[in-house]
Amino acid sequence: MRRFFLTCLSLLSVIAFSAAQTASVNPNTDHYIYQGYLSDYKLALASEAFASIDTMLQTYLPQTEILLPREMALVSLDQLLHDTDNDATEPFYRFINTRMARVLEDLDRPVTEGLRIYKLYNDGFIIKSAKATVAIDLIPGGSNAKPFITDSIIYGIAGKCDALFISHWHADHANLNIAKSFAARGKRVIAPKDLWVDVDPMIQPLAEHKETDIVFEDLDLTLHVLPGHQDNVYNNINVVEFHGVGTVAQTGDQWYCCDMDWIDRVHLKYDIDVLMPNCWIHDMERHLRGFAPKMIITGHENELGEHSIDHREAYWITIKKMELVSALNIPYVLMTWGEWYDYKK
Amino acid sequence: MENLTRLSQKWLRLSVLCLLAIDVLFPVVAQRAPDYSYEDDYIFWGNPSAYLEYQAKIAFPLIDAMLQVHPPKEVMNQHRRMALVTLDQFLHETNSTRQAALYSFATTRMARMLTAMDEPLTSGVRICKLPNSGFIIKSPKTVVAVDLVAGSYAGGSLLSDSIIYEILFRSNALLITNADSRHCNSDIAQLFTTFGKKVIAPKGVLKSLGDKVMHMGDDYVQTVELEGMTLNVVPGHNGNAANNIYIIEFTGYETVAHTGAQNSDADWDIIDLIHQVYDVDILLTKSQSTQLERMIAGFQPTKVITTGENEMENSIDLRESYWTTQKRMSNLDYLHVPNIVMTWGEIYDYANGEQTDISAISDNTSSSSQKVFKNGRIYIRRNGQTYTLTGVRVK
């Protein structure tokens, strides 16, 4: 009996101590003193750093020449995003949503010439011409329970797009709820073979995994789907030809050596203006030679969630990788989430 | 039957050997070729530690470049803020694998600082910031080091022996505020005495050096005349431990005060009155205090330079950040005392109540290998790339 009481007492002490620890509030927050409050400190540091990075990135916008302050901001962001303590924290949510909210706002700004290319999380892009706005691999990120991008922002963005193209079924590229939101507004969703079959007439997986042309007369564009792979997974390489304006290609998670023979010849058939490869694509140089684009905008950097930090591809790694192919003399623009670049032929 | 048994045993042995071979060989096959470099493809999959190490190698030179382009000033621009908060991030990691990049960063900056420090000074004071609360303060007549320590990190030192020697050779005296190892190093103090330099420390500190050290600090303010300066020692405390507050009147030039690790409430009676006795130009003080306002009010300096940021010996929550210092000083804007947040290896020139042209010194006189003079213009070289001072990459 005595042992029982002692055990209960010990348990109660532990619970009470834990509760006190959890409930304790740093009395010196106003003085920015965090002694004994490590997690508070890290949150505050992240908050300060994200804000500083955001300010700098707004000052030094994406362009073909990366200025030192922008490079500094991107590397600083890499450091934050490679510290898993910052995953799913309030400063992170604030940072990404602030930036995506700017995209939502900017989508109302008309494009009169060329293409405006928005970079989203994760490998997502929106390309806007004077006549059409199309999204590729648009997802909210995070989990269903706690998405990175709030519903109001991500569905607001979706609501301003005319079509959605999906590269492959992986959750970091395809989100059924987003696709349904397009379908509900009578907008077409083009998905790879076998994805979301018979879900909605407006959600249209390819019948065969082969080179396919889909004309969107109302949007004055043609989607050329090239049958790529990520290992054994069907991976649509979406080549979007905005008639008379320009052509962009997004490679999804292309990673398959056996596609290289036809990729080598893509440039013979298509005049690609902007190529948006996954930043970790294997043999970047050969892909660039195959597509022969006039400009490159990489995607898929800093994929969070389940990715371990060694495969959260940093912006500085992209800089280094692009230096390795600099002999090709193809300009590239390094963008982060919530940025856009106006491309003119 | 016997043959069959022998055969099966042979096969079993062979199978085990094959399994062993696979077990041994597979990891070898999975590894990169011996001559592989991460610079071949920048793929770090499976090696997060190598990734972070490389990231530090990339980031520290960038931070350094940004800080060179945006040196310390009263009003901190967003570029410098960005660099410092990034530095805070890296200095609040605990992984020692990044030690090499940090050491290189610190050493490069110190070497550059020493070069800039040698530039002639005809008026005012030149203040050079070292790790922890360390400073070198130079006037046209003398040079004094305060709380010079090597700064430890992951078992190593931020400042190499050669840098300590270079500082020693340039200094006329060493002032030590208190016994804490973040402020005081007996080996360094002994070196100073060996080379005939004055060492001043609180009573009871560095006893082993005997009368080679001038022990000062009592119940009253003491004053001593040293080469090129009048040194006033205010007897402060860190908890119950002695902590000398030094008020250095550089003969014919400015007055600089250093508060060490002062934090005792018992000393406010003296500190509150300091401004009535001394005309302090620059106050060097820790910002990590809930009584910072009172400290500044007591000294009423023309400018404040904060100390003690990113002491690598401290746990992360105690390791004062540059950004927290900025925030804390912003809270005191209403005092209208300008403050300057400096990091290791930076210099601040001050004369007649104003900062003199620090950028002219750091940009035109440094012989650092990272600076390139071409066609009459200054460029920064890093990672094989050339940048203008405004950050434009030059092709």
Image: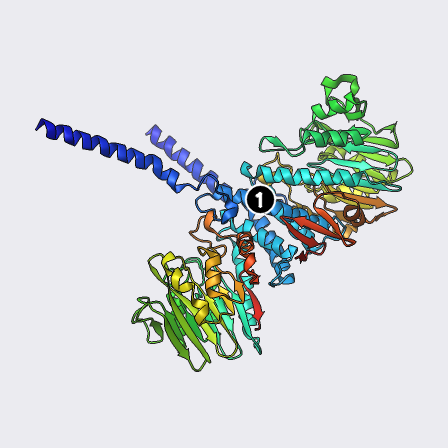
Q: In the displayed image of the protein, which residue is found farthest to the bottom?
A: A218
Task: Identify the residue shown where x is 53% and y is 63%.
Answer: A296
Residue A235 locus on image (x, y percent): 37, 63
The correct choice, above or below, for A235 with respect to B376 in the image is below
In the image, is A207 to the left or to the right of B141? left
Task: Identify the residue shown where x is 50% and y is 47%.
Answer: B40
Task: Identify the residue shown where x is 56% and y is 39%.
Answer: B98
In the image, is A41 to the left or to the right of B326? left
Identify which residue, A52 or B217, lies in the foreground. Answer: A52
Identify which residue, B135 or A331, lies in the foreground. Answer: A331
In the image, is A280 to the left or to the right of A235? right
Q: Residues within 10 Å of mark 1 (few under 14, many from 20)?
A: many
Label 1, secondary structure: give it.
helix
Chain for numbered disc 1: B
**Residue A137 seen anywhere in this rendered image of the structure:** yes
Name the quarter where the N terminus of chain B is drawn: top left
Q: In the displayed image of the protein, which residue is found farthest to the right?
A: B252
User: Within the image, what quadrant is residue A233 found in?
Assistant: bottom left
Instruction: Name the residue that disc number 1 marks.
Output: B56
Q: In the displayed image of the protein, which residue is found farthest to the left?
A: B1
Query: Which amino acid does the dot numbered 1 rest on?
Result: Ala
**Residue A183 seen anywhere in this rendered image of the structure:** no
Residue A185 locus on image (x, y percent): 41, 77
Identify which residue, B12 or A236, lies in the foreground. Answer: B12
Residue B226 locus on image (x, y percent): 87, 28
Identify which residue, B157 or B7, lies in the foreground. Answer: B7
Name the quarter where the C terminus of chain B is drawn: bottom right
For the image, the number of numbered tags is 1
